[in-house]
Image: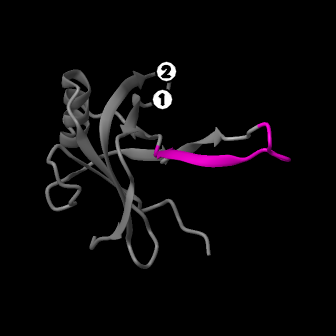
Amino acid sequence: MALESQGVICFFSTTTSGSTAAAAIVGGVSGFNGPSGAANVIDITSLQSTAKEKLMGLRDEGKITVDVYFSATDVAQTKMRECRASRTKCNLGLGLTDGSSSLIAQQGYVTNFSITGSVDNAIKASITFEIDGPSTWSTFTK
């Protein structure tokens, strides 16, 4: 079953908890990409091996990019800019639209907040969130 993107909620918090209760909803979200995690493959092939032998390295949850319509007064967007400037660890969550209301939550750092504008278009921002540690999947109440 496919999930609809319309209705996804992006939460942002500067508290140490990934809870949505203390989080601000990011306004103007038009899209997202991630988490984009991967893990290294460790080659342990020896001279006695008859084929490549491997181990999995630690997983790296990667990053999430959130695209928004820029708002200088949006509380969450402002906090994201402040966290990038101060290099402060924060929390980002994506509330999905499935029946169980899945939440992908993670701690990390805002590493990029860039705005763009062009003729006959709204000002947009692209925000990159680098994940530190594991992403967690849970349920939440909207």
Task: From the top left corner, tell me how far across and down residue 40 is, in percent.
Answer: 58, 40
Residue at the front extreme?
48
Q: Is residue 54 left or right of residue 128?
A: right
Q: Are marks 2 and 1 in contact (CB under 8 Å)?
A: yes
Q: What residue sits right under mark 2 in the picture?
A: 118
Q: Secondary structure at mark 1?
A: loop
Look at the image and give the residue range highlighted in magenta.
Answer: 47-61
Q: Nearer the viewer, residue 2 or 133?
A: 133
The verdict on residue 55 being magenta is yes
* Coordinates of residue 121 in the picture (x, y in percent): 48, 29
Q: Which mark is residue 121?
A: 1
Viewer-proximal residue among 115 and 121: 115
Identify the residue shown where x is 39% and y is 33%.
Answer: 127
The coloring applied to the image is one colour
Q: Is residue 54 highlighted in magenta?
A: yes
- 10 Å neighbourhood of mark 1: few (<14), some, or many (≥20)? few
Q: Is residue 10 above or below residue 2?
A: above
How far apart marks 2 and 1 lie (CA) works out to 6 Å
The single residue placed furthest to the right in the displayed view is: 50
> Residue visible at 59% across and 49% down?
56
Amino acid at circle 1: Asn
In the rendered structure, the answer to whether residue 96 lies left or right of residue 24 reads: right
Drawn side of residue 17 relative to residue 70, left or right: left
- Residue 47 appears in the rendering: yes
For the view shown, which residue lies furthest in the bottom direction? 99
**Number of residues whose C-alpha sits closer than 10 Å to that of mark 2, classed few (under 14), some (14–19) or many (20 or more):** few
Q: Amino acid at mark 2?
A: Ser
